Amino acid sequence: MNKIDRYLQFDDPIVSEFDLKVNEQFDIIDGLEQLDIKTMVEMPPELEIDWDSAVPVYLSLFINLNRDEVPYKISAKISSYFKVDDEISNVDALQILQTDAATILLSYLRPLVSMMTAASGFPAMTLPMIDFNSED
């Protein structure tokens, strides 16, 4: 397991889904509008988590799925098992999994998104930082 500041360990992430649909009709001359990026973090319900074991965390990423005038649409899913230090309360551990684990998983998707969008014939997309603390 990899360690982050000793409080969080994780296995190598696994990309279980990556779907890129290129819009060949898109005219780059019209310019790129703001991208529509949505995420979803999933893990077992709190009452089902065994805090003595590693917890699976899944991050789904959706880019431009509900828009038509875009160069591409992307959906991806990545996951890993995370273990939070035993000295951290379960409430804090749950928050760490929802924020820090999601941020780690996103960092593994970032180069994949950049490489695949560059190969699409359009400029490479660099995923921005996402605040998983927000309620949006």
Image (cartoon, rainbow, N blue to C red):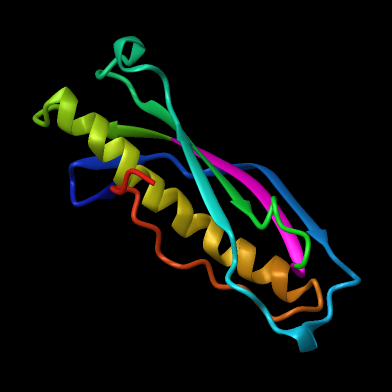
Q: Is residue 96 left or right of residue 29?
A: left
Question: In the figure, 32 relative to 102: above or below?
Answer: below
Q: Residue at x 78, y 83 (%)?
A: 28
Question: In the figure, 71 relative to 45: above or below?
Answer: below
Q: Quadrant of residue 23?
A: bottom right
Residue 86 image position (x, y, % from top left): 14, 27
Question: In the figure, 68 relative to 11: above or below?
Answer: below
Q: Name the foreground residue: 127 vs 84.
A: 127
Q: Quadrant of residue 69?
A: bottom right
Q: Residue furthest top?
A: 47
Q: Name the foreground residue: 134 vs 55.
A: 134
Q: Is residue 85 visible?
A: no
Q: Is residue 107 left or right of residue 53?
A: right
Q: Quadrant of residue 98?
A: top left
Q: Residue furthest bottom?
A: 29
Q: Residue at x 37, y 40 (%)?
A: 10
Q: Is residue 111 visible?
A: yes
Q: Quadrant of the N terminus?
A: top left
Residue 136 image position (x, y, % from top left): 39, 46
Let me know if residue 93 is in the magenta part.
no
Residue 123 image position (x, y, % from top left): 70, 81
Question: In the figure, 44 relative to 57: above or below?
Answer: above
Point out the stretch of residues depicted in magenta: 70-80
Q: Is residue 106 left or right of residue 15?
A: left
How many discs appear?
0
Residue 118 image position (x, y, % from top left): 72, 76
Q: Main secondary structure of the magenta part?
A: strand
Q: Residue furthest right?
A: 25
Let me know if residue 78 is in the magenta part.
yes
Q: Residue at x 38, y 17 (%)?
A: 45
